[in-house]
Each structure stands twice: as C-alpha cells, then as structure tokens.
Image: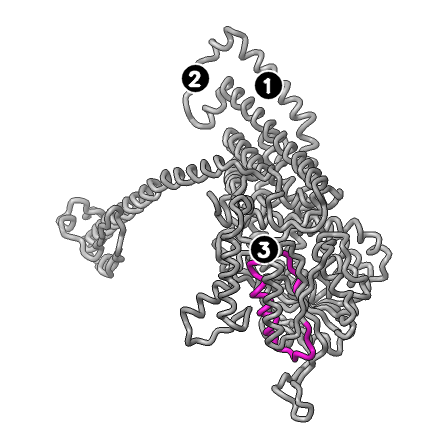
C-alpha cells in the first residue's frame, strides 16, 4: 500500500500557484497592499478509487498548508514591523507631553491663588467671602493630601516588605536576591517582620471592616443610581418606539388676515428678556437673533437687562439697542444701579416694570443664545387651551461642540440630559428643572410661584420647583433647538459645574419643608425629594468621588477590603454606553468620557458639600466665559467673502456701522494701560486637587501592580493619567503656555 503522506514525492518540487503575496515598500514602513486568497485549485481534490490518487491528494493538501503557513508568517512579520513603528513613535510623543507638562509647571499659576483677577465675578461678597472660600478650598485640599501622603508611605512600606520577603520577584519571575543573611546579621529583617505582622493585624481587625462597609454602602448607592439611569433610558426608548410627542394646538400662521390686516394665528403679548453681564463677545448675536423673531411688533417687547460693570461694554450694548430701535424694533435697554441678587435680581427688577402687566408670556434667553426666527411660533401655541401649562422649554444645541475634547465630552453629557432626563420627566411627570434660558413662561405661573428669588445661585431651578408645588405643568420640546455656546476652557467649565452642583443643595435645604407641606401627591413628593434632589444631585457626586477616588485606591493598601471587578469596570462601562446613546457620533470618545466624568467628581463633590453645609464657595456666581464663535467678527468676514450671497446678519442692520463698532472697540483695547491688559490676560492654571488625586491614583496603581491585580491596575493607571492631564489644564482651550 502506498503511504498516505508522500513527503518526498516529485509533487513537492512543483511550484504552487494561486497564493502570491504582493508587498509594497513605502519608506519608512512596510505596508501590505494585497493578499490574494488561495485559488480554487488549492482546494479542489479530485476523487479517485486508487490509493495512488488519494496519496497525491493528501500531498497536495500538505503543500497548500505549508504555503499558507509561509503566507501567514509574512503577514505576521509585516504586522510586527508596523507595531515596531508605532512603538518607535511613542518616545517622541511622551517627550512632547513631558515638555508641555514642564512648561505648565514652570508657569506657576495655581487655583490656590486669589481669583480677584478673574473677570466675570458679579454680585456682592467682598474680600471676607473670598477669604472664606480660600479656607474651604484649603481644607478640602488638605484632606486629599492626607490620603496622598498616607498612600505614599504605605507603598514604601509594602515595597520594603516585598524586598525583604522576595515576594516581588515571585510575581515578576526574577531570581530571589540572597540578602537574608546580611539583614539577619543586623537584626533588621526580624524587626521589620514583627512590624509588618502588626500592620497586617491592624489592617485586618480595624481598617478593613469600616472600609468594606463604606465600600458596600457606595456600591448600593451606585446600583440605585444605575437603575435610575436605566429606567430613564427605557423611558426614552418607549417615547421613540411609540413616537410620543408634545403637539401644540393647531395654528394656521398665514401671511395676513384680509379682514383685520394682521397676521393669522395665535399671537398673544410676549415679553422677551436677555439678561447679561459683561458679555462683550456675544451680546450682538443674541440681540440680533431675538430682534429677528417672527412675531408681530405690536405684540412683542424685548428687554436687554444689562448688569455689566464695564462702562465700555455698557456703551456698546446700549448703542446696539439704539440701532435696532431705529429699525422699528420694540426693544429697551435696562441697567441696574444697584446690582444685587445676580441673575435672579436682574430678572426680578425687570418684572417689576409697570408695563409688564400687559404681557401674558415671557421668553428668556441668555446672552449666548440665538433662537431661530420661528422659535415663538413653535413654543407659544402649546399654551393655547392649556391653562395648567406654566413652562415650555426648548432644547439646547451647540455651535462649538466639536471645538476640542472638552466640548465633545460636554456635548455627550448635555445630550443625555436633554433627550433622556428632561424629555422623559416632561412626558411622564410634567416636571423638570428649568434650564434658565431658551424657555417661555406664563407670567401668571411666575407670579403664583412667588416670582424670582435671590436666595440661591440656581434661580431657574428654584422657580421651577415652586411653580410645580403650586400645580403648574411643564413641557419639554426635544425638536425645538436654540443654539448656544459650550465653555471651551476647563477653568470656565469647572466654575460652571461648581455653581450647578452647589446651588441645588442650597435649594434642597430651603425647599424641603415646603415640599413636605405641599398638596401635591405622594408620588410627586417622592420624585422631587429622592430622585430629583437626593439621587441625582447629592448621591451621584458623593459615590463617584468616594468610591472611585478614595475607596478604590485605599483597597489597594488594605486588600482585605475588596471592590469587585464589575463595580470597577463593567457597570461604569455600561452606564457610559447608555449615556452616549443620544450622541452616537461621540461613540469613539466613550473611554475618555468615562475617565473625565470620574475626574469631574472632585469638583462636583466639593460643590455639593459647599451647598449642603452652606459654605462660602456655595454663594459664588461666576459668569461663564464665552468666545463668541458666531459673533459679529465671524459674520463680517463671511459677508466680505461672499458679497453676492444674502446673509442674515445677527446683530446690526447696517454692516458698515457694525465694522465701525468693532474698530472702535479695538482702539479702546489698544488705548488701555499695559498693566490692565496684563491683569486681564487669560492663563492656563494648575489645579492642585486634581493633581493630588492623580498622584494618589498612580501610587495605588503601583501598589496594585505588586499585588498582580489586573483590572484594578489598568483602571487606576488610566484614571490617574486623566486626573494628571486635567490637573495640568491640558484639556480644553490652551492659552498662554
């Protein structure tokens, strides 16, 4: 019988056809251009009754297998060469990052310095309040440093223990150094062994139980908050599946009524308010957009509520209003002499005007918001034949969401907030927090709720809660958008988030008795107290900071207290995936989003504590910096490039006059003193809280590496790097490096 595998037959000498490998060399890397699949001849094995034919077929299979193995070797070599090229690019990238870090550290400007040179702080407070804020920040920073110093000491202690015992070499597979006799001669090894055994006893008996208990509490809170997030996502899915939508009363907005000579449709008296303070970059675009609203002039009044303390800005805004008045727009300029109560005081002062009683609704737009011309036609009709409706809120859209990594991550957060949280609460509960802008209020609802109050820095949430307690219903329109601008620098975003998370805790303390005494149903009371305030405003920042920034690093040094892998990795990844669903184009940023949200927990936790315990920083109101992406300068350049194409200028009707205003502003800037310009110069800062937490997490990652804990090491490493980048202000707008 012929052998089954003819290893030395003449067929082995034949050339194999159909599996060529075409490789193109591109300096400096090799790249595979085409890899042809085996031809059909490689796989066709003709059947034969003779043993010789079977032997030849087996030999053909062996040859094909050998050739395919060679082809796979080529592929692996090419892939390895590419990987080597990628690795070669890492050192220059690391050197570039180190250089940026060095420049940032040398600049020496930290967040611990006085904020007196920061523009945009409004209201009263004085030097005493600023000193109190600094003391509060110093206490928080001291607590974080305490954990950092403790972790460094414990890491050194563990490294010494591994050195004496040789455990580290067991983990890394290196031979044990024979130094036992040397240390035993001096008695050091025995003394250190006794100290380490005492430390293990203290760790097991006294440190691990309370740490594990706190970890379990945070895990339970984490699961409750995750369940709430899941229910909201299911509600949003149900809304889309059933195509549920808030539909306004049918209105025929025709051109003109032939009998009366007026526009057709539902046109009640509407008051539009634009509160602003030192908004030099964006005042023109907001005023211009509001003045272009498609609404009868006799039914519309625009109030520009300017709280600016800069005379130049006041003059520019006043001039802008006068130009629109000359065009026939019913617009007035108001400037308060006594600027108290921040934005709430500004709105309260405007509502006290005698002519306000003639108007039924009020629309509010912040200085960087640009409503479309049909905004009122798409929102006001919802009030018709719906006497219980107090608020119609539109969604925000962002002109600069792709500007940098920081704005992309903000867009993910706010897309979930609007499309999931506010839409679901609006559909199923008729209640959500007013966003402070891009909304239309029934003036009767404002008056019934007690009007604007200056008792917190979240006057929008305050008025919404009080109106809901009086029985008014809210509607959120996910399909009506109003363009605005996201903070492009981490400093501006950090201050904004501090106000957004300290204010609700202030409000919760003030509103809790009123919520309990109110006549609303028990289910609405539960929703407002537990879900709206406690779970989403207090518990979320508490467990995020405590669990991932304090407990997780400490469990590396007290391994008897454990955090399961699903708490560290799987559940956060799932929640981040749910958060990113409303913004599917941002899916590539899911990992940076997860890390950045944990990084922001330090700011949110500090703000929550400040608001809950009425600390000084809870009363800070800092106007968020704007860059004016769609400001007049951009529109001027756009019109100059395309003179024949009609463009809707969002500010002054006369383009030449607009250019004169810009030139005058530039001259005034040049004429300002050098000391003043240097004082107002923007700087990137070094944030000490984030830096301290970065080193804490990196120290814990080194300890987890000694213990060979896989997923914990990677999480701590990347989270520590995230804190490091944020602490050095290497995310967002980069200025004055």
Residue designated by label 3: 413
Q: Is residue 662 magenta?
A: no
User: Which of the 4 quarters of the picture holds residue 158?
Assistant: top right
Residue 264: percent from left, percent from top: 66, 86
Residue designated by label 2: 177
Determine contact: label 1, label 2, CB under 8 Å. no
User: Which of the 4 quarters of the picture holds residue 522?
Assistant: bottom right
- Asked which secondary structure carries label 3, the reply is helix
Of marks 3 and 1, which one's residue comes earlier in the chain?
1
Relative horizontal placement of residue 628, taking residue 269 as reference (left or right): left
- Asked which secondary structure carries label 2, the reply is loop
| Depicted 303 relative to depicted 220: above or below | below
Label 1 – label 2 distance at C-alpha:
20 Å
Residue shown at the point (74%, 52%) measured from the top left? 456
Q: Residue extending furthest top?
A: 185
Of marks 3 and 2, which one's residue comes earlier in the chain?
2
Residue designated by label 1: 196
Residue 381: percent from left, percent from top: 69, 77
| Depicted 57 relative to depicted 113: above or below | below
């Amino acid at each position: 019988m012929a052998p089954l595998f003819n290893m030395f037959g003449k067929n082995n000498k034949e050339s194999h056809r159909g599996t060529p490998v075409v490789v193109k060399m591109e300096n400096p890397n090799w790249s595979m251009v085409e890899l042809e699949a085996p031809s059909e001849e490689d796989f066709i094995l003709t059947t034969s009754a003779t043993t010789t034919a079977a032997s030849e077929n087996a030999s053909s299979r062996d040859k094909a297998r050998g050739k395919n193995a060679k082809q796979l070797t080529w592929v692996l070599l090419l892939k390895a060469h590419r990987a080597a090229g990628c690795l070669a690019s890492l050192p220059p990238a690391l050197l570039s990052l180190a250089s940026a870090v060095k420049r940032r550290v040398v600049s020496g400007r930290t967040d611990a310095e006085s904020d007196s040179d920061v523009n945009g702080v409004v209201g009263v407070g004085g030097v005493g309040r600023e000193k109190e804020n600094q003391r509060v920040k110093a206490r928080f920073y001291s607590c974080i440093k305490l954990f950092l110093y403790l972790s460094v000491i414990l890491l050194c202690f563990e490294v010494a223990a591994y050195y004496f015992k040789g455990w580290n070499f067991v983990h890394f597979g290196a031979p044990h150094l024979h130094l036992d006799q040397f240390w035993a001669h001096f008695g050091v090894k025995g003394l250190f062994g006794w100290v380490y055994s005492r430390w293990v006893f203290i760790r097991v008996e006294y440190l691990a139980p309370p740490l594990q208990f706190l970890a379990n509490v945070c895990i339970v809170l984490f699961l409750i908050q995750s369940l709430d997030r899941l229910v909201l996502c299911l509600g949003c899915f149900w809304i889309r599946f059933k195509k549920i939508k808030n539909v306004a009363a049918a209105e025929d907005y025709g051109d003109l009524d032939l009998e009366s000579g007026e526009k057709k449709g539902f046109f009640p008296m509407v008051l539009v308010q634009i509160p602003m303070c030192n908004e030099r970059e964006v005042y023109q675009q907001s005023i211009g957009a509001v003045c272009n609203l498609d609404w009868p002039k006799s039914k519309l009044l625009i109030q520009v509520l300017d709280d600016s303390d800069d005379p130049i800005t006041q003059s520019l805004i006043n001039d802008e209003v006068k130009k629109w008045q000359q065009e026939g727009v019913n617009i007035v300029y108001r400037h308060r002499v006594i600027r108290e109560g921040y934005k709430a005081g500004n709105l309260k002062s405007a509502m006290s005007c005698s002519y306000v009683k003639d108007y039924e609704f009020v629309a509010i737009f912040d200085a960087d918001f640009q409503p479309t011309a049909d905004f009122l036609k798409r929102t006001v009709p919802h009030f018709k034949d719906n006497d219980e409706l107090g608020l119609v809120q539109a969604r925000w859209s962002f002109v600069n969401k792709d500007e940098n990594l920081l704005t992309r991550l903000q867009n993910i957060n706010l897309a979930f907030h609007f499309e999931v949280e506010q839409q679901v609460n609006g559909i199923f509960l008729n209640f959500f927090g007013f966003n402070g802008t891009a909304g239309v209020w029934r003036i009767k609802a404002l008056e019934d709720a007690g009007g604007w109050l200056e008792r917190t820095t979240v006057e929008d949430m305050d008025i919404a809660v009080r109106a809901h307690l009086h029985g008014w219903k809210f509607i959120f329109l996910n399909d009506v958008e109003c363009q605005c601008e996201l903070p492009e620098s981490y400093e501006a975003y950090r201050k904004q988030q501090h106000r957004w998370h300290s204010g609700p805790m202030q409000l919760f303390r003030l509103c809790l008795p009123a919520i309990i005494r109110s006549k609303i149903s028990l289910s609405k009371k539960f929703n407002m107290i537990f879900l709206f305030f406690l779970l989403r405003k207090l518990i979320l920042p508490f467990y995020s900071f405590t669990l991932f920034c304090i407990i997780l690093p400490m469990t590396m040094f007290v391994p008897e207290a454990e955090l399961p892998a699903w708490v560290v990795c799987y559940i956060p990844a799932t929640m981040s995936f749910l958060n990113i669903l409303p913004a599917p184009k941002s899916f590539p940023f899911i990992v940076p989003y997860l890390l950045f949200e944990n990084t922001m927990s330090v700011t949110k936790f500090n703000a929550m504590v400040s608001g809950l315990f009425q600390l000084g920083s809870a009363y800070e109101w800092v106007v968020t910096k704007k860059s004016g992406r769609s400001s007049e300068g951009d529109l001027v350049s756009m019109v100059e490039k395309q003179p024949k194409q009609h463009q809707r200028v969002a500010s002054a009707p006369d383009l030449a006059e607009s250019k004169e205003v810009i030139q005058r502003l530039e001259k005034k800037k040049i004429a300002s003193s050098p000391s003043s310009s240097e004082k107002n110069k923007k700087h990137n800062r070094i944030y000490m809280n984030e830096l301290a937490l970065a080193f804490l997490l990196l120290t814990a990652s080194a300890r987890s590496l000694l213990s060979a804990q896989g997923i914990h090491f990677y999480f701590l490493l990347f989270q520590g790097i995230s804190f490091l980048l944020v602490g050095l202000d290497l995310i967002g707008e980069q200025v004055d490096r």
